[in-house]
Amino acid sequence: MEEKIIAPQKTGGFVLLTLTLAYILAIVGLVWSLTNINRSNLALSVLIISASYTIIGIILFSGIKIIKPKEALVLTLFGKYAGSIKEAGIYFVNPFCIAVNPAAGTKLGQSGDVDGSSSKTIKLDKDSDSSISSPIKKAISLKIMTLSNNKQKINDLLGNPIEIGIAVMWRVDDTAKAAFTVDNYMEYLSLQCDSAVRNIVRCYPYDVAPNVDTTGDGRADDGSLRGSSEVVVERIKEAIQKKVVDAGLEVLDARITYLAYAPEIAAVMLQRQQASAIVDARKMIVDGAVGMVEMALESLNNKEVVDLDEERKAAMVSNLLVVLCGNHDAQPVINSGSLY
């Protein structure tokens, strides 16, 4: 279904004023005719006209439509799509036109998933029983909105369970498709976000792993969820956009809001990261210690301070490595006698 933009003249204010004055005159005429109904035939005619307009006027008032900036009305006439109004203003349309918004009763939270149960009543406080009624709006918002879905537990490329959450910035681009192509475009977007995140995340390991192909080109790369977040969210954005274009929605951006190992393996993975860090640190210490020992032996040899045979060199190297690579300060035992 193609969107049809209608731009009726902004005569709603004049029509509203006219209908209000006519309604007041009808009420005055109704009161006057009731008080003079037995005195003249004119009172009977005024009574009929006033009573008729009092009933018909209510129907005419339903043709007044007020549209705020960045909102749109999708109108149907006797079940047929009549068109969409996107420009802000006050209009008078066919009183029998009905505004359609399939997601009017759906609450799209900024920090939670789609919640359709709390659309008619909004709690003022978490621990309070007081509430206020929120009228259901038939206008479709054209503003940029944020969908922050709940965290999902997904297995990454290596099979490790992780938890991830994303925030998607989106807006309605085609009001006709949003209203008539899907049952509820907000819930549809939420489900497509979950599906896209699951399909893309399982193509990446949490951290860089050897011999892993994340792009599908048959060559190993360094892609990971933690190190390639920009690439991951771009793929998620494209995957969502392909799914929601038929619903008249446009995905503007996507961002990862939460990324961590699942609680059942978080402690083990932390120990693994700590072990990897310790190994890397030890390697650096050993490389530095070997260089220092080599420099010391070369300096002693060049300056001819002492002539060491291979056995004494081995003992010196052993002692220096123990001192340089130990976790604690060395407590040497001084030999005041002969080396033999």
Image (cartoon, rainbow, N blue to C red):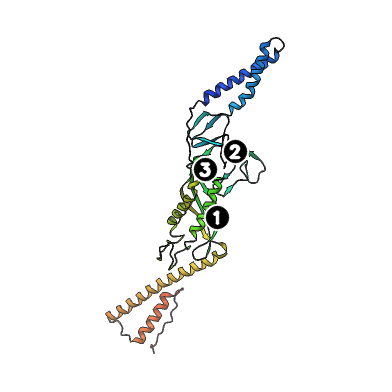
What element does badge 2 sit on?
loop
Which residue does the numbered mark 1 point to in the structure image? 151
Tell me the kind of residue under disc 2. Answer: Ile
Residue at the top extreme of this rendering: 39
| 299 to 264, vertically: above or below | below
Which residue sits at x=43%, y=55%? Answer: 230
Residue 136 numbered mark, or none: 2
Which residue sits at x=67%, y=43%? Answer: 129
| 286 to 195, vertically: above or below | below
Q: CA distance from mark 2 to mark 3?
A: 17 Å
Tell me the kind of residue under disc 1. Answer: Lys
Q: Nearer the viewer, residue 253 or 263?
A: 253
In-image side of 317 versus 91 (left or right)? left
- Which of disc 3 and disc 2 is earlier in sequence? 2
Residue at the right extreme of this rendering: 38
Q: Nearer the viewer, residue 322 or 37?
A: 37
Q: Is residue 32 visible?
A: no
In-image side of 146 versus 35 (left or right)? left
Q: Quadrant of residue 95?
A: top right
Which residue does the numbered mark 3 point to in the structure image? 178
